[in-house]
Image (cartoon, rainbow, N blue to C red):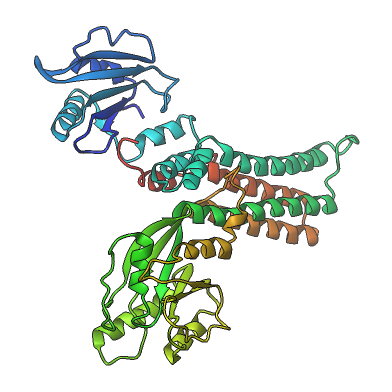
Amino acid sequence: MDTTIAAISTAQGIGAISIIRVSGKDAFKIVSKIFSNKNFKDAPSHTIHYGYIVDNGEKIDEVLVTKMCSPKTFTTEDIAEINAHGGITTTNKILELLLTNGCELATPGEFTKRAFLNGRIDLTEAEGIMDLINSKTPEAREMALNQVQGKVSNLITDLRDDLASIIANIEVNIDYPEYEDIEEMTTLKIKEKLGLLKTKINKILKQSNTGEILKTGIKTAIIGRPNVGKSSILNCLVGEEKAIVTSIQGTTRDSIEASVVIDNIILNLIDTAGIRETEDLVESIGAKKSLKIIDEVDLVLFVVNYNEKLTLEDKKILAKLQDKNYITIVNKADLEKHIDDENLKNKVYVSALKDENIEGIGEKVKELFNLEQIETSDLTYLTGARNKAILNKVLKSISDVETGVKNNYPIDMIEIDLRNIWNLLGEITGETYDEELLDQLFSRFCVGK
């Protein structure tokens, strides 16, 4: 990290301002080469300076430049931020001048990566920054902010502290058996403490599933036979004509995707082709694809008609849904009732034509996923496939240690296994890491962040 990096931190395009960020040991020296304000280089930290960006005497733009000295910066390095007028040509020209005068172009997420490597933040906080940028609901924003503030890191720190306490006691028992005032880590006590640790981890994992729903949404398929109003329901939920709606069976030949936020819950919707036996090759392929999608989603909105009895096709779909989370949407509730709905589960009666009771779908989703029971006062959840995979690996390792304790393995071997678990938990926060992991994680960030 001996280089000084630069990148555009605001979205490219026409806007009121654009920000070009520079970080590194030569940040002030390089900016001073192209900044007309000669007082900038020797100015105190955390001050803003007015002037022009110039190139061989030619004024490029009127700017404000913020100076922030190490270590009280995001990366803990010297940072200069150039606030220029928004616009692609001007912004790119300023970046070009910085690169010409000694900066290197930052890679995706390199500013945040430097913040991590310099000890400013840990990995969960870094992931929280990206989640904050991508948040789509108030709950997702609050969860991400809690992660940025280190509340999620504290969950892992507490687990590591519990393990460290067990390890320390075992080591004292081994090295100083004559100390009678130190708690003896008997087999029973180790099992008891590991049991409490597993309970904590299982609680974190359970809550993480809720956190994932709040953060990324529920992958949802709208399923049913032709002409029950699947596309009309999609359009009602989204609030626009996303799908073509006609009275002709088989209009929807392929899946259509859209996202909608209902009561702060993100539904990632897939409107599928109607499922029925048909000689039409294209429609038949669409129907097979719809059946396959059922196995790939978290929730199915199963649509039937209020004014018709359940058909054989309806019953076949229903049989396939028995092991899935599904809501039965009884559409066309404005017409005369003919449906035999006594055995249908999680029913919501709607009229897509008249846009009636569409909000009932969101209420049923919250009920089905127990989202009404979420404790909204403290949305501190560990999310992300990487973190959940590590916790599941930790649970497996703890079970292996419990087996070793049961089989009377030597206490020093158990202590080694516990220390490995302690290191494994450290991978979540970045106490232990490898370069490949960092490159993969920060490559998902935008350039300039």
Eyeballing the image, is 349 above or below 54? Answer: below
Picture coordinates of residue 358, whole percent (x, y): 44, 65
Eyeballing the image, is 354 above or below 439? Answer: below
Disc tally is 0
Closer to the camera, 57 or 2? Answer: 57
Q: What is the quadrant of the N terminus in the image?
A: top left
Residue 176 at least partly seen? yes
Report whether 410 appears left or right of 36: right
Picture coordinates of residue 21, whole percent (x, y): 30, 28
Q: Residue at x 48, y 73 (%)?
A: 349
Q: Quadrant of residue 428?
A: top right
Picture coordinates of residue 218, whole percent (x, y): 46, 61
Closer to the camera, 76 or 213? Answer: 213
Q: Quadrant of residue 92?
A: top left
Q: Residue at x 40, y 36 (%)?
A: 113
Residue furthest to the right: 180
Residue 393 at least partly seen? no
Eyeballing the image, is 352 above or below 52? Answer: below
